[in-house]
Image (cartoon, helix red, strand yellow):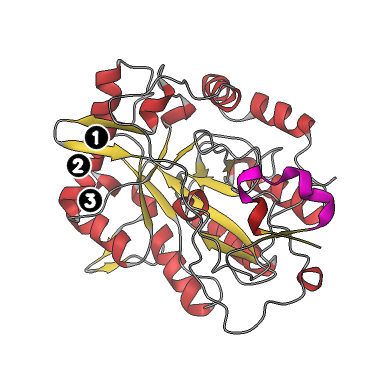
Amino acid sequence: MDHLDSRFTRRALLTAGLAAAAAACSSATRRPVSSRTPSINPSPPATPTTSATPTSPPPDPASVKANELGVIPVLMHHRLVDKVDSEYDMTPAWFRAELERLLKERYYPVTTLQVARRDLGHVPAGRAPVVLTFDDSSRGQLHYDGSSIAKDSAVGMLLDFAREHPEFPAVASFYLNKDPFAIGDPHRVVADLAKHGMEVGNHTYDHVPLRLSAAKVQEQLGKLAAMVGAAVPGLQPRTMALPLGVEPSLPALARAGRWRQTTYRNEAVLLVGAEPAHSPWHKSWNPAGVPRIRSSSYGGGTGEFLSTWWLDQIKSGAVTRYVSAGNPGHVTFPKKYADRLAPAYRGMAVAY
């Protein structure tokens, strides 16, 4: 099978997490963003960037099985804890094993914003982009041992893993709420995330489903954006994750709006589940509703539509992943997938 099977999509949305969240996620996936816009118009589609300039000709795309129209796993993490109590939990050991699997299967970490901006030219030829996302800014994701980032936190583990394996950079997207990581010092944690090259994203100030008035939606997103900007001047979240997958009644408010003196703009909106995301070059790519895959070690972590299940589907060839051609400024794919390329990028196509 050369793309996402429709039966996977329907079943995944029916079984992803809590029923309310799944229903909201399904609605967000199917319903296009309203043509009505808030007072601040969303940013226009990002212009493709070429973050890496090759110093030698790219390899023959067939030799690396390049397909830049394949899917990208966006893995959704919540709590890293020693004792797993829910489907939102994962042990540090499980997370380490996940990193080892991703490295072995030639994945390469990128941020949500890099996908949204089509800024994937730095992904080495033959490697597959993967996005590691973290919601709720819980303590297991980042805490400290004295003045140093704790090695058993997600950030500490990512940094250590990258030191051991320089070909697998410490890159992830963290979606924050107020008092991120329960440290009591947003300035410190936001600065540390930025210093280490992590993306800082918006998950609303109070972690509330956004079925609110337009003013309250903008307050939730604007207040969190203001907190980030106060912590690191000039830094602003540019992607957001919907709490429980619930979008606003006016979906465009998830993309852009204003609260007091703070204007926010999000170039991608993440859902709760429950399948890989389309390539940003694909005609079905929708930055207003980017699906994710839950990562959890609950119940052994092998449940249907969890990360292990989807990574197995990709490994088996049942679902075809994005594989970089190492040819920045172009979109490379087998000729049989040509009808999946978004028309705006035909001038960049390299079909083989």
Residue behind mark 3 = 183
Residue 206 part of the magenta segment: no
- Tell me: residue 284, above or below residue 301: above
Between the residue at mark 1 and the residue at mark 3, the CA separation in whole angstroms equals 21 Å
Work out whether residue 297 or residue 188 is closer to the camera in this orientation and state it.
188
Q: What residue type is labelled 3?
A: Ile
Residue sitting farthest toward the front: 347
Q: Is the magenta stretch mostly helix, strand or loop?
A: helix
Q: Nearer the viewer, mark 3 or mark 2?
A: 2
Q: Is residue 100 visible?
A: yes
Q: Position of residue 50 (x, y in %)?
A: 51, 65
What residue lies at 20% left-to-right and 58% top-to-bottom? 188
Q: Position of residue 260 (x, y in %)?
A: 14, 31
- Tell me: residue 211, above or below residue 199: above
Location of residue 206 (image quadrant): top left
Residue behind mark 2 = 226
Q: Can residue 184 be seen in this view?
A: no
Residue behind mark 1 = 222
What residue lies at 36% left-to-right and 46% top-to-bottom? 238
Q: Label 2 near label 1: C-beta < 8 Å?
A: yes
Looking at marks 3 and 2 on the same chain, the residue that comes earlier in the sequence is marked by 3
Between the residue at mark 3 and the residue at mark 2, the CA separation in whole angstroms equals 18 Å
* Quarter of the image that includes the C terminus: bottom right
